[in-house]
Image (tube, rainbow, N blue to C red):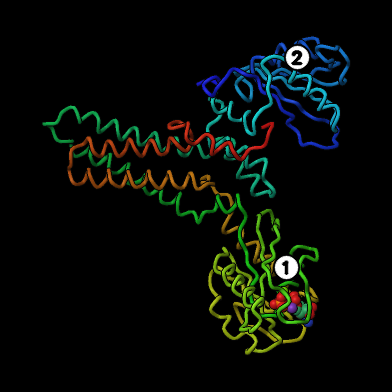
């Protein structure tokens, strides 16, 4: 496949670095115009893959635009697979704008669409679709764990898993095909056993991959944590402490927080969205009622709950909170500066004095790691992957049932073909057109 399949033989250009005041801005151009462009602006074509100093001039007026560095990455061994020219110019507003305008004035050069460089890399077989998604995630990564997962996917870790599985399906299919041409002969028992064995192992792998508690997706999006509990327990105080700033209003008046308030946090390298909510209680105030409704919805929806109570207020003040205790809840007994010794599983803390908060954060970090740690086998990171693996698993299950029931081999073979195809869609080996736009839509310009 070549880039021309995607529309035209145009060269695309964009500023690849973020806009604003900066030491350097990189302008990238990919396509057949890369070499002539370098010749026109830099006065020569530099040695491949070597940053070379050049005075960049406007190709028509010959006015100097910048004293810069230029490079040529010849295709097909470039990021996009085409010839790529890079102009490392002074950053800021005027210089990149002047160089970009000069480049766009050249024939066959147009502005790149978001993600178009990566799209060309895919179309020229430089990377598969999961690697393209990994590059996107790498750019979006905000925490260490996200960076690690994204880099692994960008380097082909996830594609390797799916391609290996696809290979096994093709092998099983080939074994069946060999007997389809001999309808009078039964599939020998040992061949059947070997195929069934292999397929059984494969569906086991699929199931484990799907039952990974959505760790890859969670890590991409951040764990959803809700702080819940009775009014005045110190929920907003805890949020402010976690966020290290005054995000929420804290006051001695019960019913202070009404709306759900969210902060995005990096907790030991793991991303989380922590939501502060209204105190749970019966109330006649209709605005507060709505707050309580939202709090309950958020608590139900959360991956993890921080259940906060004012331990010093006595047992009545925490009546009814027990229903939240469980695997996805960390029980926090606040205000122990006023006394009290809560039993397990309550973690005694005082947000005011700071007592017990290291233990709480340690526990929180442990829960995040358990749900999102990057493991030996790469995790799927998108609903797109989950759907395809699920469909592949169903098709393999049908094939196994069919083979056991002794139906004509064409039918299980067809199911295996379908399963292989579903896996091929994830990496972009088949059915490319319909998924391309969905994958590249999320990119920024210049990547
Ligand atoms: N003594 C003591 N007071 C605390 C502690 N944590 C919070 N408070 C106080 O408890 C009161 C309520 O705190 P908030 O953080 O507003 O409680 P909340 O759970 O968000 O309250 P609502 O939003 O009304 O449900 C405030 O006066 C805080 O200063 C603590 O550890 N010890
Ligand atoms: K309050
Ligand atoms: Mg509050």
Mark 1 sits near ligand 1, with its Cβ under 8 Å away: yes
Q: Quadrant of ligand 3?
A: bottom right
Q: Nearer the viewer, residue 93 or 233?
A: 93
Instruction: From the viewer's perspective, tell me whether residue 165 is left or right of residue 82.
Output: left
Q: Position of residue 173 (x, y in %)?
A: 30, 33
On residue 38, which mark appears? 2
How many C-alpha atoms fall within 10 Å of the one at disc 1: few (<14), some, or many (≥20)?
A: many
Q: Nearer the viewer, residue 119 or 54?
A: 119
Q: Secondary structure at mark 2?
A: helix
Q: Nearer the viewer, residue 357 or 308?
A: 308
- The relative height of residue 156 versus residue 101 in the rendered view (above or below) is below
Residue pictured at 64% horizontal, 18% vertical: 31
Mark 2 sits near ligand 3, with its Cβ under 8 Å away: no
On residue 9, which mark appears? none
- Using the numbered discs, state the Cα–Cα distance from disc 1 to disc 2 in whole angstroms: 54 Å
* Tag 1 residue: 239
Q: Position of residue 45 (x, y in %)?
A: 75, 11
- The relative height of residue 46 versus residue 203 in the rendered view (above or below) is above
Residue pictured at 86% horizontal, 16% vertical: 55
Which badge, 1 or 2, is on the more N-terminal residue? 2
Residue pictured at 23% horizontal, 39% vertical: 192
Q: Position of residue 226 (x, y in %)?
A: 63, 67
Residue 339 showing in the rendered view: yes
Residue lying farthest to the front in this orientation: 286
Instruction: From the viewer's perspective, tell me whether residue 115 is left or right of residue 27.
Output: left
- The relative height of residue 266 versus residue 404 in the rendered view (above or below) is below
How many C-alpha atoms fall within 10 Å of the one at disc 2: few (<14), some, or many (≥20)?
A: many
Q: Quadrant of residue 4?
A: top right
Residue 54 showing in the rendered view: no
Instruction: From the viewer's perspective, tell me whether residue 251 is left or right of residue 323.
Output: right
């Amino acid at each position: 496949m070549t880039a021309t399949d995607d529309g035209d033989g145009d060269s695309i250009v964009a500023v690849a670095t973020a806009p604003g005041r900066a030491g350097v801005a990189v302008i990238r151009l990919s396509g057949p115009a890369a070499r002539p462009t370098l010749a026109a602006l830099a006065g020569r074509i530099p040695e491949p893959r070597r940053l070379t100093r050049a005075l960049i001039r406007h190709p028509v007026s010959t006015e100097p635009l910048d004293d810069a560095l230029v490079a040529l990455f010849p295709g097909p061994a470039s990021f996009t697979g085409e010839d790529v020219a890079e102009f490392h110019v002074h950053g800021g507003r005027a210089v990149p704008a002047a160089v970009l305008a000069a480049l766009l004035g050249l024939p066959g050069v147009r502005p790149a669409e978001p993600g178009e460089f990566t799209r060309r890399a895919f179309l020229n077989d430089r990377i598969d679709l999961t690697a393209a998604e990994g590059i996107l995630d790498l750019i979006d990564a905000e925490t260490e764990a996200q960076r690690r997962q994204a880099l692994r996917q960008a380097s082909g870790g996830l594609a390797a898993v799916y391609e290996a599985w696809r290979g096994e399906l093709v092998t099983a299919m080939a074994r069946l095909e060999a007997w389809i041409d001999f309808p009078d002969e039964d599939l020998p028992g040992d061949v059947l056993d070997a195929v069934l064995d292999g397929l059984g192992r494969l569906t086991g792998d699929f199931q484990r991959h799907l039952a990974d508690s959505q760790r890859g997706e969670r890590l991409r999006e951040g764990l959803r944590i809700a702080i819940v509990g009775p009014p005045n327990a110190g929920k907003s105080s805890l949020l402010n402490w976690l966020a290290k700033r005054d995000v929420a209003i804290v006051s001695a008046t019960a019913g202070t927080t009404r709306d759900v308030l969210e902060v995005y946090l990096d907790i030991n390298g793991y991303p989380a969205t922590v939501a502060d909510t209204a105190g749970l209680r019966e109330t006649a105030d209709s605005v507060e009622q709505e707050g309580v409704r939202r709090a309950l919805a958020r608590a139900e929806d959360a991956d993890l709950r921080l259940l906060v109570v004012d331990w010093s207020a006595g047992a009545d003040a925490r009546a009814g909170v027990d229903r939240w205790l469980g695997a996805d809840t960390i029980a926090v007994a606040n205000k122990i500066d006023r006394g009290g010794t809560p039993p397990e599983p309550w973690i005694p803390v005082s947000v005011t004095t700071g007592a017990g908060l290291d233990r709480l954060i340690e526990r929180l970090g442990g829960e995040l790691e358990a749900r999102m740690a990057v493991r030996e086998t790469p995790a799927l990171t998108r609903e797109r992957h989950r759907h395809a693996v699920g469909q592949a698993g169903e098709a393999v299950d049908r094939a196994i049932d069919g083979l056991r029931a002794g139906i004509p081999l064409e039918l299980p073979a067809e199911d295996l073909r379908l399963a292989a195809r579903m896996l091929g869609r994830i990496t972009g080996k088949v059915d490319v057109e319909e998924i391309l736009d969905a994958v590249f839509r999320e990119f920024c310009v210049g990547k």
